[in-house]
Image (cartoon, helix red, strand yellow):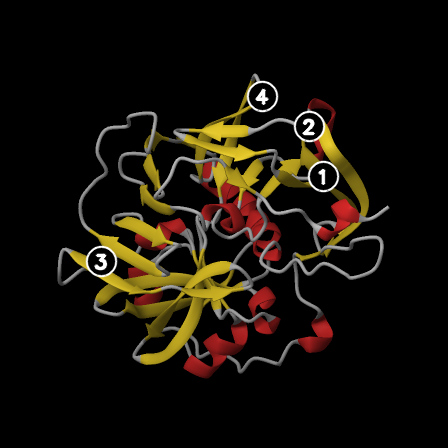
Amino acid sequence: MRPLLNFIIRLVLLSVLAGCSTAPTSTSSTPVVVIRVGPNPSTISTPKPLPTADPALIDISNRSPLDAPRQVNVPTQTNEVPMLTINGLPAVEVFINGSGPYRFVIDWGANIFAMSPVLAGELQLPSLGVDIMGNQNAHVALLKIDDTEFQDLTVVLDPFFSQSEEDGVLGRNVYESLLTTLDYPAQRVRWEKGQLPEPDGKGVLAYSPTEGGAPMIEIALGAQNYWAVLDTGASRWIIWPASQIDQLAFKFGPVKGNLATGPQLGVADTKMGRLSDDITFGSYTISQPIVDIIDRPEILIGSRLLKNFTVTLDQQNQRVSLTRTTTDPIIIPTATWETLP
């Protein structure tokens, strides 16, 4: 029962986190943030039907989109590729079954391999049937990023990606056996064999996984400690659960008027504000950060903050490193809505 529950949770969470990839702010006096958590049906192309997989293939694969590849080949100790940026999120070019390149977001907040049904139709991926959420699954024989090969994966076809700039998402399960480094300042992504050194509480931290396995580090807000997910699939600085808003002290705001839309949330108001206290973790301080407040269960540290760091994820040992050239406090620039009367 537990794997089934995890599958449901991760599929729902994927839609929510993928929605954070675009958050345009209006220029009106009341800021509006649209957090897409699902597709607009009128903008989705009709995907081509997929061929039915050979029964032997289904027996061989017998995996969900949450599972790791059957085999990973890294020809050299380290493989480094350019980092693309899609709506503020890190992405890379991939080849699927020899075709490409396609652009996939690297999402540490998700533990799933997903792509557009339109792309799957173009590639004529063998269908593995429909999952409990009603989404079609398909088989990918080879996912290749530069010289690194990921063989035999199951992918979920999520309509969200049929009308987004990215073709899909690479969750943690795809590269769980490798060290994954996102060098935001240099705009490079690196996969390699090995492990991070022992945690030192400064630049190398032990993390506690969420139920779905996302890396959570301990942070301090003023005198209070919290756990926060390092979520490269969220484009904001920090997302804070609405249920904890009473625990926050604000220097400015919170400002009402944000809008989150999607199949899970429907239409929901959100808030944003600048905190009075600093947030610290390891050797680093974020001076009076801006937070987006939404009705969700976890605190998220998004790519807009992580872009100040080179971050490495060691899933085998549940460690993460965060390095930057200085330990000076990170100062988030004044937002337009902070200057409004």
Mark 1 and mark 4 lie on one chain; the one further toward the N terminus is 4
- Between the C-alphas of marks 3 and 4, the distance is 45 Å
Circle 1: residue type = Gly
Tell me the tag on residue 222.
Answer: 4
Mark 3: amino acid: Gln
Binning the other alpha carbons within 10 Å of mark 2 as few (below 14), some (14 to 19) or many (20 upward) gives some
Front residue of this view, candidates 148 and 61: 148
User: Which residue is tagged 3?
Assistant: 71
Residue position marked by numbered label 1 in the rendering = 273
Pointer 1 with pointer 3, Cβ within 8 A:
no
What is the x, y in percent for residue 168? 48, 66
Q: Residue at x 70, y 41 (%)?
A: 294
Residue 137 tag number? none
Q: Residues within 10 Å of mark 4 (few under 14, many from 20)?
A: some
Q: Nearer the viewer, mark 3 or mark 4?
A: 4
Q: Of helix, strand and loop, which one carries label 2?
A: helix
Decide if residue 68 is in sight here. Answer: no
- The correct choice, above or below, for 179 with respect to 27 in the image is above
The type of residue carrying mark 4 is Gly
Query: To which residue does mark 2 refer?
Result: 244
Mark toward the start of the polypeptide (2 vs 3): 3
Amino acid tagged 2: Gln
Image coordinates for residue 144, horizontal then vertical, percent = 28, 69
**Which is closer to the viewer, label 2 or label 3?**
2
Label 4: element kind: loop
C-alpha gap between disc 2 and disc 4: 15 Å
For marks 3 and 4, the one nearer the N-term is 3
Query: First in sequence: mark 2 or mark 4?
Result: 4
- The residue depicted at 58 percent of the width and 72 percent of the height is 162
What is the distance, in whole Å, between disc 2 and disc 3 at their CAs? 42 Å
Can you name the residue that lies furthest to the left here?
76
